[in-house]
Image (tube, rainbow, N blue to C red):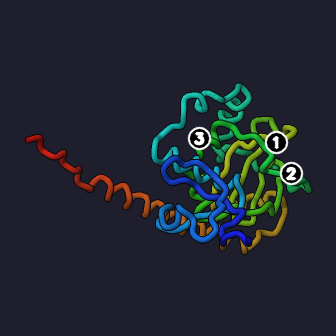
Amino acid sequence: MAGGKYSGKWHINPKTHEVGQCNAKKQCRFENIVLGNNQHYNTKEEAEVIAKGRLIKDHGLLSKEKENQDSFKEKRNVQKYKTKNERDLTSLKKINFKFDRKQCEETRHVEFDRAARRLFIAEEIGEGEIRDTFSIDHNGENRYLIMLNTAVVEIYTTDEPPLFITTYAERPGRIKRYYTAANLEVPDDLIKISLDNIRKQDEYVRRSREKRRKRREKPYCEAPSQK
C-alpha cells in the first residue's frame, strides 16, 4: 500500500517537541496544530533544529545536562567569534573547498544561544546550499566563511571535521564587502535575497511581538468556587 502524502517526512510533536517520522496513511495527527498549519520537513536534522528552537523559545533553557555540555574548545571559539564585526576582511579569499555540513559538530553557542536565530532561518528562509566558501583570518586563526544561496552565512573552524560556530542572515552591505575583499563581482541575486530576508525578519519580529502581547493580555481563568 502506498504511503500518505507525508510519508518519509519528519514532523514535531507540538506538546513534547519530539521529532518523529510521519507514517500517516491519510491525515497526520498533528494536522493544523503546529503554527496553524501542517509542518513537515524533508530531513530529521531540519526538524531537530526547529524543534530545539521552539523548546528554548517556549521554556527557556534546555536541561542542565545539555547546558553543561560545552568544552574548552567550544568556549574558546565562542569567545573569539561571536562578534562577527571584528573579522579582518583583508585576509578574506575564496577557496574551492566543500564539506558535509550535517556531519559537523556544533558549539554550545550556535546550539543554544543562536537557537532562536536558527529557528527563524529554518522557518522563514530555508536550509540553503553552499554557494561560495571563503577563508578568513580572525585573531590569527583561520576560519571558513560559508555563503549559502539563501544569503545566509555559516562560520566553521578549519578542524577536521570543521566545528560549526555560528550563523546569521547576512546584510547586503556585508555581502558586498566580502566579495569586494575577495576581488570578485558582487552577486546581485544575493543582494536581492538579502533585502528580502530583512523584510522577512522584520515581519517575523512583528508577529512574535504581537503573539507576546496577546499572551500578556489574555485573562487568567478563575478557579471554581468551593461550596
Q: Are marks 2 and 1 in contact (CB under 8 Å)?
A: yes
Dot 2 or dot 3: first in sequence order is 2
Q: Which mark is residue 112?
A: 3
Callout 1: helix, strand or loop? Answer: loop
Q: Residue furthest top?
A: 72
Q: Residues within 10 Å of mark 3 (few under 14, many from 20)?
A: many
Vertical relation: 138 (above or below) 29: above
Q: Which mark is residue 99?
A: 2
Q: Nearer the viewer, residue 140 or 115?
A: 115
Which residue type carries mark 1? Pro
Q: Quadrant of the N terminus?
A: bottom right
Q: Which mark is residue 162?
A: 1
Classify residue 95 as left or right of residue 214: right
Q: Taking the image as drawn, is residue 39 in sight?
A: yes
Measure the alpha-carbon separation of dots 2 and 1.
8 Å
Dot 1 or dot 3: first in sequence order is 3
Determine the residue positioned at 65% across, 33% down: 79
Q: Residue furthest front?
A: 1
Which residue type carries mark 3? Phe
